[in-house]
Each structure stands twice: as C-alpha cells, then as structure tokens.
C-alpha cells in the first residue's frame, strides 16, 4: 500500500507579501494571453446550464473573459445560442465525447466557433483523448481546444499529448459537487492546480473559487484563468427566472436555481431519468438572487489587482514567479476573517 501524499487547498495557505515597486494597483496588467488570444480578464464562466447561457456569455465576453456555453440542449439550440452570443473570440462552447460531441463540434465550427471545450467529469480518459485528436485532425490549429477535467500531472500530460491547448483542472472542488463524497476521489484544488500547471500548456482552475482571494491563490499556483460557477450563480445574467419566497418571518426574498450538472435534477431533465446504476454527483438548490454579475467580476478583479501589488507583480504570470505560499493553521485562518472584539449594536 502506498502512503498517502499531502494535498492542500485554498484555505490551507496564504500568500507571503513581498516587495512592491508598483505605484498603484490600477497600474497592473490583468489580461492573459492564451494560445495567441488575449483575454482582458483571467475569468471564465462555467459551462453549467444555470450559469452560462446567452446573456452570461455576452456579459463575460464584453468584459474580455472567456464564456463557455453549456451543451445541455440540442445541437441546433447550441448553434442558435452561439450565434446569438455573437463573439467567437471570447465565447466557446462545450461539447461532449463520442458521436454527439463531434457532430456538435462540426455544427458549431461551421457556425464560426473558434473555442471548443471537451469536457467530462473525468477527463483522463480514452474517449476524451479520441475526441481531442479528432478535432485536431479536422481543424488542425484553427480551433482552440480546452479539455478536462483532470487533477494530476499525468492527466494534464495525457490531454496535452492528445492536442489540448488549455487544460481544465478540478476534480471535486465545485460548490454543488458531491463527487468526493460519493466516490472518495479528488485532489485538493490548490495541489491539483500546482501539479497540472507544471505542464507546458495553459490551465483553467475550475471549481472551488469562493472569494477573490481564492482566485489570486489559484493564479499564483499556476492557473492562467479561474472558472466560476457558484460565484456567478444567482446573478441576473444567469439563465432561469427569479423565484420569490416568503420566509417564516414574513419577509420576501428572491432566489434563482443553481445545480450541479451531475445532480439528480439535471440528469433527469436531460436524460429523461437517472439510470439505476448511477448516483448523483451534484446537488441542486436555490441561491439568493444577487443582482448583476458585474459586481461579482468587479470584486474579484479588485482583489486580483490588489493581490498583485502585495508581491509587486506587474502581470498575472509574474504572480507565479514571485509568490511564495505559506501553509497555515486553522487558528491563522480564523485570524484572517472578520472578528471585531467589540462593537456598537
Ligand atoms: P464552483 O465555481 O461552483 O465551485 O465550481 C464550478 C464547477 O463545478 C464547474 O465548472 C464544474 O467543473 C463542476 N461541476 C458542476 N456541476 C457538477 C456536478 O454536478 N458534479 C461535479 N462533480 N462537479 C460539477
């Protein structure tokens, strides 16, 4: 039996401040270059059906980020969504594997898509490899291929060898994900990012980002972009209606639905029913309606800009070079959260 190795996630570490020569936090460069394309912000919206539909795609693209439309509709509807979003440089689309995946890719590339995401729960697999190779054979380097999800160097290396330009990293850290509980598998996200970004490809850190600090840590660990599901959930730009609920104290609050793509609810909707041999690996819930996604993005970008000046990083990739991580105790974590000892009521 092998002895367990150690895995760390965002809350286990802090970034150690170091010398800063940058005058103001608005003088840092937050854009990132990925496969010859420039993205104005290092943020991607998750290809979940309660996160990235047309409106979110338009919004994220307008901010310079990468929007990945979900694939939980027919191929024709996917094409219509992509056309309506109307920005091939910043809007990609996720496809599955097998025949549907390739047919979807064909229809989308014919409609002008330049970014495809081959995306399954466990990306270190033969079928993903096959799909990436087929895309590469059909369109050589005209299409940017994002592939995932993996959480190890071996997984990232496998997808890179198949021809992926960007590796999507994250097994089990998602806010509505229960893979680790249901299967016992996963890698704490910070370790997964560090491991996967040793590969000579771009990396999207997907899942587990709960605040701007997590995003800075993910970028410092080697990611080129962070992908957001939960943080964007409940915003006006997500698909789905606002639901009003009267709480027990009589107050009325607004919610929106947010669900894991492997939740029972999502699987039943898309596949008619959940097969008996499967278990749900995600949950479905209602989250508070938050207003515009703009506020979320501004908050994260503010955190990233500020974070960069805490170590004098002029560019995102400099964060990786300059920053040192410190593993912390739970007492240190408590110290770092608001804890006023006395206050006026
Ligand atoms: P979040 O930003 O909400 O923490 O994480 C979003 C990511 O969670 C998604 O981009 C996707 O990779 C992952 N995810 C979405 N739905 C599910 C699910 O039902 N099960 C699992 N295991 N992961 C999910």
Image (tube, rainbow, N blue to C red):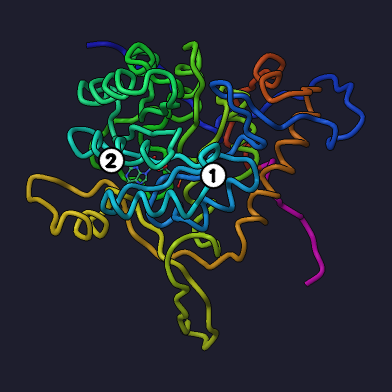
Q: Residue at x 13, y 58 (%)?
A: 273
Dot 2 and dot 1 residues touching (CB under 8 Å): no
Q: CA distance from mark 2 to mark 1?
A: 18 Å
| Residue 63 coordinates in the image, percent (x, y) | 65, 46
> Crowdedness of circle 1 by 10 Å Cα count: few (<14), some, many (20+)?
some
- Residue 99, above or below 338: above
Q: Residue at x 7, y 50 (%)?
A: 276
Quarter of the image with the N terminus is top left
Answer whether residue 165 is magenta in the image: no
* Quadrant hosting ligand 1: top left
Residue found farthest to the right: 23
Report which residue position mark 2 lands on.
Answer: 104
Residue found farthest to the front: 110
Residue 87: numbered disc: 1
- Residue 120, above or below 165: below
Quarter of the image with the C terminus is bottom right
Which of 182/153 is in front?
153
Q: Residue at x 55, y 33 (%)?
A: 10
Examine the residues drawn in magenta and state their main secondary structure: loop
| Residue 27 coordinates in the image, percent (x, y) | 85, 32
Which of 322/104 is in front?
104
Q: Residue at x 69, y 49 (%)?
A: 299
Q: Quadrant of residue 36?
A: top right
Disc 1 is placed on an element classified as: loop
- Residue 170, above or below 178: above
> Crowdedness of circle 2 by 10 Å Cα count: few (<14), some, many (20+)?
many
Q: Which residues are magenta?
A: 335-345
| Residue 109 coordinates in the image, percent (x, y) | 37, 36
**Does label 1 point to a residue whose CB lies under 8 Å from ligand 1?**
no
Which of 343/273 is in front?
273
| Residue 26 coordinates in the image, percent (x, y) | 84, 37
**Does label 2 point to a residue whose CB lies under 8 Å from ligand 1?**
no
């Amino acid at each position: 039996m092998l002895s367990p190795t150690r895995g760390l996630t965002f809350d286990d570490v802090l970034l150690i401040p170091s010398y800063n020569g940058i005058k103001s936090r608005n003088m840092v460069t937050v854009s990132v270059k990925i496969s010859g394309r420039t993205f104005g912000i290092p943020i991607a919206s998750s290809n979940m059906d309660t996160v990235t539909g047309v409106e979110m795609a338009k919004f994220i693209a307008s901010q310079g980020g990468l929007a990945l439309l979900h694939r939980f509709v027919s191929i024709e509807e996917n094409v219509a969504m992509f056309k309506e979003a109307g920005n091939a440089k910043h809007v990609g689309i996720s496809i599955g594997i097998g025949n549907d995946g390739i047919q979807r890719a064909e229809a989308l590339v014919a409609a002008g898509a330049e970014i495809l995401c081959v995306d399954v729960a466990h990306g270190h697999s033969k079928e993903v490899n096959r799909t990436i190779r087929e895309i590469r054979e059909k369109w050589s380097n005209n299409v940017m291929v994002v592939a995932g999800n993996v959480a190890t160097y071996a997984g990232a290396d496998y997808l890179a060898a198949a021809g992926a330009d960007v590796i999507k990293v994250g097994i089990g850290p998602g806010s509505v994900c229960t893979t680790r509980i249901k299967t016992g598998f996963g890698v704490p996200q910070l370790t997964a990012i560090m491991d996967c970004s040793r590969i000579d490809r771009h990396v999207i850190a997907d899942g587990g980002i709960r605040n701007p600090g997590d995003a800075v840590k993910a970028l410092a660990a080697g990611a080129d972009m962070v992908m957001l599901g939960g943080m964007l959930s409940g915003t006006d730009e997500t698909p789905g209606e606002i639901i009003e609920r009267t709480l027990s104290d009589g107050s009325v609050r607004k919610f929106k639905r947010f669900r894991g793509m492997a939740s029972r609810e999502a699987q039943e909707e898309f596949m008619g029913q959940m097969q008996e041999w499967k278990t749900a690996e995600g949950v479905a819930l209602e989250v508070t309606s938050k207003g515009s996604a703009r506020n979320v993005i501004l908050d994260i970008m503010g955190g990233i800009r500020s974070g960069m000046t805490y170590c004098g990083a002029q560019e995102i990739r400099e964060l990786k070079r300059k920053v040192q991580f410190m593993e912390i105790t739970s007492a240190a974590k408590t110290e770092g959260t608001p804890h006023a000892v006395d206050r006026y009521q």
